[in-house]
Image (spheres, grey):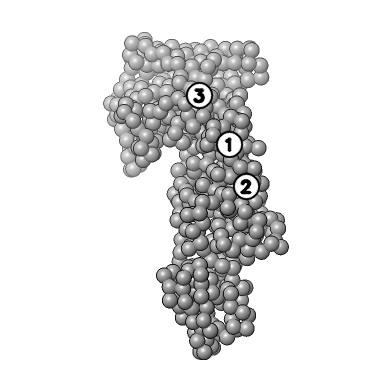
């Protein structure tokens, strides 16, 4: 029996002994032919390693099914897990962005401020748990042999009127490595709009046909029990995508598993992430097809300093002001064991901001306090335990245990802040966006030290809106973080630039689009 594959340009011969031979330039032809053989012919054949009849001579079949990389390989380990020091930051009065605010490419170009988008999104990893309450997300790269094609599908779809479910069905089909040429009529039409000819050719050479349950069962009998359902589900998607009698709900039931209660996550819900293009964002995902996306382009804070370079007044965002009075009657002290930090005592604090309930009313609070603010750059945090330092700090100034505890705790916070600065600078450097080298730890740490000092001085002071004030002034620290990147002010917001990667490895990857509801 002689078979000719026009797609692959290969000659295949089934000899009388039941062995299939082929000549051609690409291994996938073998799998393409298996699926067109009749049931009676299949009954005469044996897959590698099984049965009593001669094996099918199909080199590369198991490699294609088990050893080839998935089209998309992004993992939590690949993702950047965000900006922990902004946890709890709650910008107020965001501007709602819609499709009408986009440019011709579907990107939102915005000025400093807070924005929200009710975003259309997609599941990019099937056979996994759907989004669950409390799940936090990191931002991962588009990684894998066909990651760019999948990203392009979402970006092109964002500018069309193709129903979202049809685009999702196409994405699931491509993730399952379905041949574009074998898609059913509806999905072929969608693929013709969202894929370029060269992309279709690339996918065709990488993809598989749907196999019978019997064939899959024989191929997967040596696969671990945990992985076997994944290969079976992937094959079912390929078969659904090629047949016209399967609904979107059939695919969804297979691809989206119900998450158990209290599914663990390594990231808190609402973790702020930083895009090197110049904005912070976070996502809250209630369902894979709908994502609440918040973005903040930090406004430049207004900072007043005295002759010693100490911050005396910080305003950010507009109207949210904190002022301190330093206690110069008590001399400044270098921090023991770390001359890079100076301890400046403070004796008074004044806060003001618009009333969150009525912005036309200004709230003001003024209080005499006893506290301190660090200024300077600490040593890098050592890996060893610093308990010995705690004992040495007491002696130079005869400090009380309470004073010592405050200094020691805040010193650790200062070192953590410096570690964050280096992490963010490295992140910006990897993105290739540090332009003139003027970013400095001092510019980053000063607002952080100042803000921590205010919080320590006022905690327990009975001010009901202190936490809100403190949260809103986090924008000053956000701005300092952003300035590591030295960017301009016309900022492109593109939710499709990375993959929303869950803090639970058994949950779905989510791809944001450039389209809103």
Q: Are marks 3 and 1 in contact (CB under 8 Å)?
A: no
Tag on residue 112? 3
Estimate the spatial distance between the alpha carbons at disc 1 and disc 2, rounded to whole Å: 13 Å
Residue 159, image x, y percentages: 58, 40
Q: Nearer the viewer, residue 88 or 277?
A: 277
Q: Quadrant of the C terminus?
A: top right
**Residue 293 bears which disc, if any?**
1
Which residue is at 63% across, 20% downward? 356
Q: Quadrant of residue 400?
A: top left
Residue contact at pointers 1 and 2, CB within 8 angstroms = no
Q: Quadrant of residue 374?
A: top left
Say what secondary structure mark 2 lies in.
loop
Say whether residue 223 is visible.
no
Sequence-wise, the earlier of marks 3 and 1 is: 3
Residue 201 place in picture, x, y as percent: 49, 59
Neighbor class of circle 2 (other Cα within 10 Å; few <14, some 14-19, many 20+) is: many
Rate crowding at label 3 as few (under 14), some (14 to 19) or many (20 or more) other CA atoms within 10 Å. Answer: some
Q: Is residue 209 left or right of residue 286?
A: left
Depicted 20 relative to depicted 306: above or below = below
Specify which label sits upstream in the sequence, 2 or 3.
3
**On screen, 444 above or below 16?**
above
Q: Which residue is mark 2?
A: 288
- Residue sitting at x 51%, y 81%: 2
Disc number for residue 339:
none
- Residue 23 visible within the image: yes
Give the residue drawn at x 61%, y 56%.
188
Give the Cα distance between marks 3 and 1. 16 Å
Position of residue 428 in the picture relative to residue 86 (left or right): left
* Residue 351, above or below 153: above
């Amino acid at each position: 029996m002689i078979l000719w594959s026009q797609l692959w340009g290969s000659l295949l011969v089934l000899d009388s002994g039941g062995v299939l031979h082929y000549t051609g330039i690409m291994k996938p032809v073998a799998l393409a032919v298996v699926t067109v053989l009749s049931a009676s012919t299949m009954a005469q054949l044996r897959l590698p390693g099984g049965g009593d009849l001669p094996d099918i001579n199909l080199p590369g079949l198991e490699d294609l099914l088990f050893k080839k990389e998935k089209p998309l390989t992004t993992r939590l380990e690949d993702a950047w897990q965000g900006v922990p020091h902004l946890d709890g930051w709650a910008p107020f009065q965001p501007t709602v962005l819609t499709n009408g605010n986009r440019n011709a490419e579907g990107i939102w170009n915005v000025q400093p401020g807070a924005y929200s988008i009710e975003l259309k999104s997609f599941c990019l990893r099937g056979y996994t748990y759907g989004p669950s309450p409390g799940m936090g997300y990191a931002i991962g790269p588009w990684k894998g042999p066909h990651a760019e094609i999948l990203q392009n599908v979402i970006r092109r779809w964002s500018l069309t009127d193709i129903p979202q479910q049809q685009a999702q069905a196409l994405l699931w089909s491509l993730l399952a490595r379905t041949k574009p040429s074998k898609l059913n009529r509806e999905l072929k039409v969608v693929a013709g709009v969202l894929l370029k000819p060269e992309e279709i050719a690339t996918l065709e050479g990488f993809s598989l046909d749907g196999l019978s349950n019997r064939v899959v069962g024989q191929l997967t009998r040596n696969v671990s029990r945990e992985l076997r359902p994944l290969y079976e589900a992937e094959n079912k998607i390929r078969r659904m995508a090629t047949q016209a009698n399967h609904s979107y709900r059939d695919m969804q039931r297979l691809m989206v598993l119900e998450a158990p209660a209290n599914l663990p996550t390594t990231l808190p819900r609402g973790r702020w992430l930083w895009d090197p293009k110049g904005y912070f964002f976070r996502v809250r995902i209630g369902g894979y097809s709908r994502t609440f996306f918040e973005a903040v382009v930090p406004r430049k804070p207004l900072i007043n300093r005295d002759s010693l370079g100490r911050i005396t007044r910080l305003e950010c965002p507009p109207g949210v002001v904190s002022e301190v009075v330093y206690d110069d009657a008590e001399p400044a002290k270098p921090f023991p064991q770390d001359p890079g930090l100076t301890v400046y005592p403070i004796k008074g604090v004044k806060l003001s901001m618009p009333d969150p309930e009525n912005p036309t009313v200004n709230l003001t609070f003024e209080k005499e306090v006893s506290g301190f603010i660090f200024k300077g750059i600490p040593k890098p945090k050592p890996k060893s335990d610093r308990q010995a330092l705690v004992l040495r700090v007491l002696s130079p100034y005869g400090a009380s245990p309470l004073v010592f505890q405050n200094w020691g705790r805040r010193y650790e916070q200062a070192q953590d802040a410096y570690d964050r600065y280096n992490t963010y600078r490295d992140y910006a450097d990897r993105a290739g966006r540090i332009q003139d080298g003027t970013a400095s730890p001092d510019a980053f740490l000063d607002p952080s030290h100042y803000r921590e000092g205010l919080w320590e001085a006022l905690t327990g002071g009975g001010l009901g809106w202190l936490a809100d004030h403190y949260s809103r002034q986090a924008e000053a620290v956000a701005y300092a973080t952003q300035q590591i990147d030295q960017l301009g002010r016309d900022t492109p917001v593109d939710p499709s630039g990375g993959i929303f990667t869950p803090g639970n490895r058994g949950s779905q990857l989510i791809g944001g689009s450039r389209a809103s509801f």
